[in-house]
Image: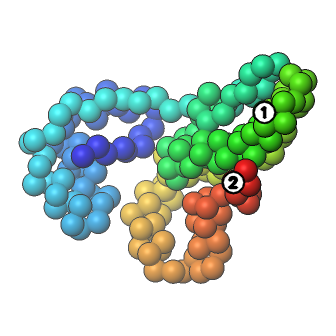
Amino acid sequence: MQIGWIIAKGKYGELRERGIPELLDRMAAHASPDFAEHLRRHRNDAVQPFLLSVVSDRAAHWSRPGLLLIGDAAHTMSPVGAQGLNIAIRDAIVAANHLVPAFEHGAAPDAIDAAAQRVETERLPEVVEIQNFQAVPPRFLLRNAWWTRIVLPWLPYVLRSGITGTRGVALFRRVAFGVTDVRLTV
């Protein structure tokens, strides 16, 4: 089992000094009861954690003559919301929709390059929106403010309660199922 835990920059050394069992105990304090029990039961079985520095960014241009970047090559996504693979697959579908017809009809290199540019033009708005969404939770949850310490422990209960109503469901669906309608047409 692999577990990802978002921490504030500069806090890894402090967590590592405390040791893995204490790290797992701290994780368990934020987990569902069944998962917390699992973490506590296996607190001495875990292997050394490692730090993964996360960068959410995108290339200035995804296409050049004879080249098209998609997925992580074009844009890296934050692990927040776990959308990296979904976005990459959606890039590939849009790329197929634009490039397959060009190749099937023996398009000239300029026409193929134009098709690659259309992929970037079509995909960029969704990538930007998802990256902007992914940037919000860490800024809120990792802020060292008095209100964060009050709100954070209650957040799982609020989200499960349905208090957020249809707006919360709509936001979840938008992130989980994409901002734009992407369908394979070739």
User: Whole-percent x and y of residue 24?
Assistant: 21, 47
**Most foreground residue, 161 or 15:** 161
Q: Secondary structure at mark 2?
A: loop
The residue depicted at 41 percent of the width and 30 percent of the height is 52
Specify the quadrant of the image occupied by residue 59: top right
Q: Residue at x 78, y 19 (%)?
A: 66
Task: Say if mark 2 contacts mark 1, CB within 8 Å.
Answer: no
- Against 70, residue 178 (above or below) is below
| Quadrant hosting residue 178 | bottom right
| Left or right of 47 in this view: 127 | right
Where does residue 36 sit, x and y in percent of width and height? Answer: 22, 60
Query: Which residue occupies 23% across, 67% down?
Result: 33
Amino acid bearing label 1: Phe
Q: Provide the residue designation for mark 2.
A: 184
Residue 19: percent from the left, percent from the top?
18, 34
The residue singled out by tag 1 in the image is 103
Q: Is 136 placed above or below 168 here? A: above
State whether residue 161 is above or below residue 54: below
User: In this orientation, which residue lies closer to the viewer: 96 or 78?
Assistant: 96
Image position of 94 (left or right of 177): right
* Residue 146 picture location, percent across and down: 48, 55
Task: Specify whether 122 is left or right of 27.
Answer: right
Closer to the chain start, of discs 2 and 1, is 1
Q: CA distance from mark 2 to mark 1?
A: 16 Å
Graded by Cα atoms within 10 Å as few (under 14), some (14 to 19) or many (20 or more), the crowding at tag 1 reads few
In this view of the protein, which residue sits in the foreground, 78 or 100? 100
Query: Can residue 120 be seen?
Result: no
Q: How is the image coloured?
A: rainbow
Give the residue type at disc 2. Leu
**Which residue is rendered at x = 86% and y = 22% of the image?**
109
